[in-house]
């Protein structure tokens, strides 16, 4: 699961850097310097992904997991904004079938980032 989550974040980070327009379109208006934020989120995703899969330092892996969990929490407002923007469109945008699972998936992604980064030795102890 750790490798799968890392691959997801690596791909998302690269997409943020190469094609920022879709992310800028869903950015809440109150976010300052949206271009810099999208660039920074892409870099954060890439470094988080690398941190999750590095084999040498469990504390670094743990920090990457906590960082990605906090990251997923911080980008949730953009997901909510995207949901509201889409529902306001005449054609309904991507629709509820896309947005409702995405809203429920966000807490799962936050938990998963924490869970896959824990030290397996410590995790097995009572």
Image (cartoon, rainbow, N blue to C red):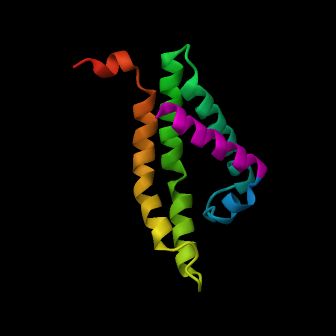
Residue 52 at x, y percent in the picture: 54, 28
Residue 118 at x, y percent in the picture: 41, 25
Residue 42 at x, y percent in the picture: 68, 44
Vertical placement of 38 versus 44: above or below? below
**The quadrant where residue 41 appears:** top right
> In this orientation, which residue lies closer to the viewer: 28 or 58?
58
Which residue does the image show at 64% across and 46% down from the upper left? Answer: 12
* Majority SS type along the magenta span: helix
Quarter of the image that includes the C terminus: top left
Which residue does the image show at 70% across and 56% down from the upper left? Answer: 34
Q: Residue furthest right?
A: 18
Q: Is residue 36 left or right of residue 125?
A: right
Asked if the stretch drawn in magenta spans residue 15, the answer is: yes
Q: Residue furthest top?
A: 56
Which residue does the image show at 63% across and 61% down from the upper left? Answer: 27
**The quadrant where residue 35 appears:** bottom right
Please give the range of residues in magenta: 1-18
Which residue does the image show at 40% across and 47% down from the upper left? Answer: 108
Residue 103 at x, y percent in the picture: 44, 60
Asked if the stretch drawn in magenta spans residue 23, the answer is: no
């Amino acid at each position: 699961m750790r490798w799968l989550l890392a691959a997801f974040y690596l791909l998302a980070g690269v997409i943020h850097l190469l094609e920022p327009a879709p992310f800028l379109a869903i950015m809440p208006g109150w976010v300052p310097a949206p271009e810099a934020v999208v660039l920074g989120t892409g870099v954060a995703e890439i470094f988080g992904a690398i941190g999750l899969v590095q084999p040498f330092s469990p504390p670094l892996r743990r920090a990457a997991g906590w960082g990605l969990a906090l990251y997923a929490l911080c980008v949730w407002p953009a997901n909510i904004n995207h949901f509201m923007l889409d529902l306001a469109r005449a054609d309904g945008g991507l629709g509820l079938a896309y947005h409702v699972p995405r809203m429920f998936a966000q807490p799962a992604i936050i938990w998963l980032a924490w869970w896959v980064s824990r030290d397996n030795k410590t995790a097995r102890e009572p």
